[in-house]
Image (cartoon, rainbow, N blue to C red):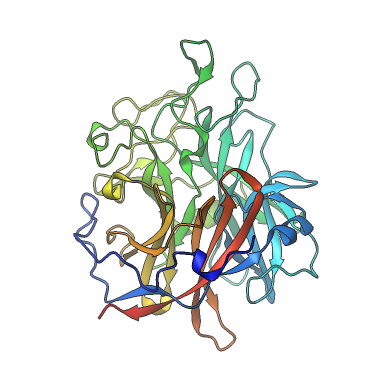
Amino acid sequence: MNFPVNAWRVLGIATLALLSPSSPAGSGPAPMIGDRLVIDGVSAPLMTNAQRRAAGIRNGPDSIVDVWRSEPGRLQLIFSGSHLEQGRGTMVVRVGPDLKIDLAAPRATVVLQADRRSPGFDYDYAGGGDVFTCPGANGKTLYFYHGENHTDPTGRYIRGPKNGWTGIGMATWNARAGRFAKDGQIIGMAVDNTWRKDKNGRYKTLQGPPISGNPNVVPDRSGEYLYLYYTDRTDDPAYEAKGQDCDKRACTAVARAAVSQVCSAAGTGSPAPWFKYYKGAFTQPGLLGSGSKAVGKTAGSAGVGGRYTPIVDRFENRGETTPNVTWLPRQDLYVMTALRRPERDIAVRYSRDLLAWTDPEVLIGPAPKGYTNKYPRLNVIAGADGAERYMMLWTVKAEASWEDAELRGQAVRFASRR
């Protein structure tokens, strides 16, 4: 995939001015940010088609890409996709300081896969998520991931994005095994996950496996809480109106848990409880027991969760997908990155408190004709001089096939709005 520089509608600065700030109920006004992210140079491929195949990757990255410093001097990218020999799941591949794939390193390795032992949320797929390292010299490394179940009550695998159900799980790194060991599900969707026959006798659910998106975690300034951003649907009438449509499409949600509890429970198989943000407070359970109800119609078998309040409005009724948040210590700022429909341009929002967010500003425009942007993620990269640098990573793929896809990187920096 070789694109001329002018094939990209890359914007030198974000093109949308701050309008009325987006603020969920009870969160207060969104901050007015003095500086903004701007493009710094030209985007470049970090992993081409040929390099991807040489690394043993059949397709991908099919999720957000996190930069994982698994040990001193060792940088890896972690993402989901399909491996040529090891199948679907979450994998790691070694990269250099410039985040380009290390061609001298071993091939990609799968470190997390679906759990076929019981028909839970990740029965058919486990991937697409975020790494978090617990505080302390020997802090545990955790992975928060998206699971999918496409297998109906008869044991048949049902293809399609609307057939099946989903959830979010946590796993803990086992260095001896070289894999993540699953702790279990932590978040369920706010709509029923029960398999039912439609009028044609085919099994379906109200959820759809993709709706939990690519979960992403970030600690607050104090280090007391870990915030998890993902996408969810709801049966709450307050969010079914035009401009939200969160009953039909996934909207941006957030849950949180105490860092001390999350890290203490990691590796035990009994993860700490998480609570969804709902009407101004973190009160709704991330995961419910079988047959229990949260509010209104939310119910179902094991694997569903409580209700939530969308953390941002569906701007211009277009919707945003794969939201994820990065903490920029030097700027004392949180940045949310997401794809905006229908053009799939890459937009950013800013926050000081993880709840009140500015309106989106387009940072990177659509991919060239015939291609689409997927899974943007802003990563903080420490330079050799110790300075804080920022790199946007995202996948660009042919609309018709994963056979033509590459990982791209774009350096960005802050500049004054004036």
Name which quarter of the figure residue 327 lies in: bottom left
Q: Is residue 216 left or right of residue 159?
A: left
The residue that appears at 64% across and 34% down in the rendered structure is 124
In the image: residue 49, left or right of residue 374: right
Q: Is residue 140 visible?
A: no
Name the image quarter holding the C terminus.
Answer: bottom left
| Quarter where residue 48 is shown | bottom right
Residue in view at x 68 percent, y 74 percent = 96
| Residue 221, x across and y down, in percent | 38, 69
Q: Which one is in front, 312 or 47?
A: 47
Q: Is 314 left or right of 89, judged from the image as shown?
A: left
Q: Position of residue 286 (x, y in %)?
A: 42, 41
How far from the left and from the top, in percent, is residue 6?
50, 68
Q: Is residue 318 above or below residue 35?
A: above
> Can I make out residue 33 in this image?
yes
Q: Is residue 46 found left or right of 102 in the rendered image? A: left
